[in-house]
Image (cartoon, rainbow, N blue to C red):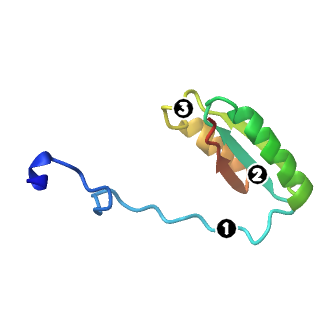
């Protein structure tokens, strides 16, 4: 009976190609870190706070904050490519 309901098993493999996880740096000292604001409430404040903590506690050289157009849309290629040229590490925000 349960098989007749049309549920989708989210643990099933799927047909999309898997993207390998990016290599992680050994530390953040001297690195330029990019923070991507997803435009949700408090996202900018959260990122600014994270940026300050990264500089103070981990020796990050500079923080670059960029903002997506809308939380329901992926970041544009322009934003992604621009950050990729400018930063060594990128973090996407999940505001509330």
The residue lying at 83 percent from left, 53 percent from top is 54
The residue lying at 59 percent from left, 36 percent from top is 78
The residue lying at 71 percent from left, 56 percent from top is 89
Q: How far apart are marks 3 and 1 (CA)?
A: 26 Å
Please state which of residues 54 and 75 is positioned toward the viewer in this rendering: 54
Whole-percent x, y for residue 51 in the image: 81, 46
Mark with earlier residue (2, 1) = 1
Q: How far apart are marks 3 and 2 (CA)?
A: 21 Å
The residue lying at 60 percent from left, 32 percent from top is 68
Q: Can residue 41 be seen in this view?
A: yes
Q: What element carries label 1?
A: loop
Whole-percent x, y for residue 84 in the image: 65, 50
Q: Name the residue under label 1.
A: 24
In the image: residue 57, left or right of residue 67: right
Mark with earlier residue (3, 2) = 2
Mark with earlier residue (3, 1) = 1
Please state which of residues 5 and 21 is positioned toward the viewer in this rendering: 5
Q: Residue 33 carries which label?
A: 2
Q: Is mark 2 on a helix, strand or loop?
A: strand
Q: What element carries label 3?
A: loop
């Amino acid at each position: 009976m349960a098989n007749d309901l049309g549920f989708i098993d989210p643990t099933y493999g799927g047909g999309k190609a898997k993207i390998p996880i990016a290599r992680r740096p050994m530390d953040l000292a001297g690195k330029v870190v990019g923070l991507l604001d997803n435009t949700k409430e408090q996202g900018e404040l959260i990122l600014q706070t994270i940026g300050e903590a990264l500089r103070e506690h981990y020796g990050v050289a500079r923080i670059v904050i960029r903002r997506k157009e809308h939380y329901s849309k992926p970041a544009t290629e322009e934003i992604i490519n621009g950050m990729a040229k400018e930063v060594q590490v990128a973090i996407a925000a999940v505001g509330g």
